Image (spheres, rainbow, N blue to C red):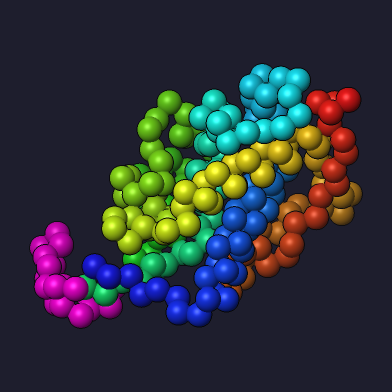
Amino acid sequence: MKLAFINKPQDLMVAGTATSSSTIERAMAELLQNSESMQKVKDELRRVIGTRTQIEESDISHLPYLQAIIKETLRLHSNVPMSYYMAEATVEVQGYTIPKGTNIIVNIWAIHHQPNVWVDPDKFMPERFIGKDTNFFGKHPELIPFGGGRRICLGLPLAYRMVHVVLASLLFHFDWKLPEGAKKDGIDMSEKFGLVLSMATPLKALATRSCNDM
């Protein structure tokens, strides 16, 4: 199948940056609402990073809970909820004949929220990925935020590194809490459509210097 690519260079630039920043924002929003997960990832970062001041790309493989948070964030909040393809040849899929030239829409959001695949699919539970080799590199069809196959997102390797390192840096160097209003009313997790799916109400949080930097 052939993916219909975005044509304009500026769209590619925006798509490449907005997806990463949106993923980090929603991961922070979920963690701020789940104090146990926040504490677990901060403990993991302290244990792995220790007295160092910089988080390196090589640290990612030693941070399984951080990886699980990113996977769970992308499962719950796909930046691109639907993927568009065109059949290059007539094929048969699970008994259905798809003629050549057919436009195919893959509902990624529905795949990531299948109750027969995911326990409590609407709940933020990074632990569901601990001890499992499930990843979003295209080999596990139940988790495909970047698509799959030959047409998997070209920006995946860079996004993988940047999202993990940036989120880890934010969590390691700062302690975070919600403003009083957000504590009372909760975070608005509703989404808006654009070039990518993003939070309708931008996240606001208060940061204080972490004891790791003192």
Give the tally of numbered discs.
0
Q: Which residues are the magenta region?
A: 88-105
Q: Note whether 201 is above or below 183 in the view shown.
A: below
Q: Is residue 153 visible?
A: yes
**Residue 208 screen position, x and y as percent:** 88, 39
Q: Is residue 164 magenta?
A: no
Whether the magenta-drawn stretch holds residue 93 is answered as yes
**Going 38% across and 33% down the picture, which residue do you hit?**
133
Task: Name the residue rendered at 34%, 49% in the picture.
Answer: 138
Q: Is residue 196 above or below residue 49?
A: below
Q: Quadrant of the N terminus?
A: bottom left
Most foreground residue, 157 or 211: 157
Q: Is residue 74 above or below residue 68?
A: below
Viewport quadrant of the C terminus: top right
Q: Position of residue 67 (x, y in %)?
A: 53, 36
Residue 196, position as x, y percentages in the image: 55, 68
Q: Residue at x 80, y 55 (%)?
A: 204
Depth check: 167 or 111 in front?
Answer: 167
Instruction: Using the rendered view, name the quadrant where residue 100 is placed.
Output: bottom left
Q: Is residue 193 visible?
A: no
Q: State the residue at coordinates (29%, 58%).
A: 150
Whole-percent x and y of residue 194? Answer: 58, 74
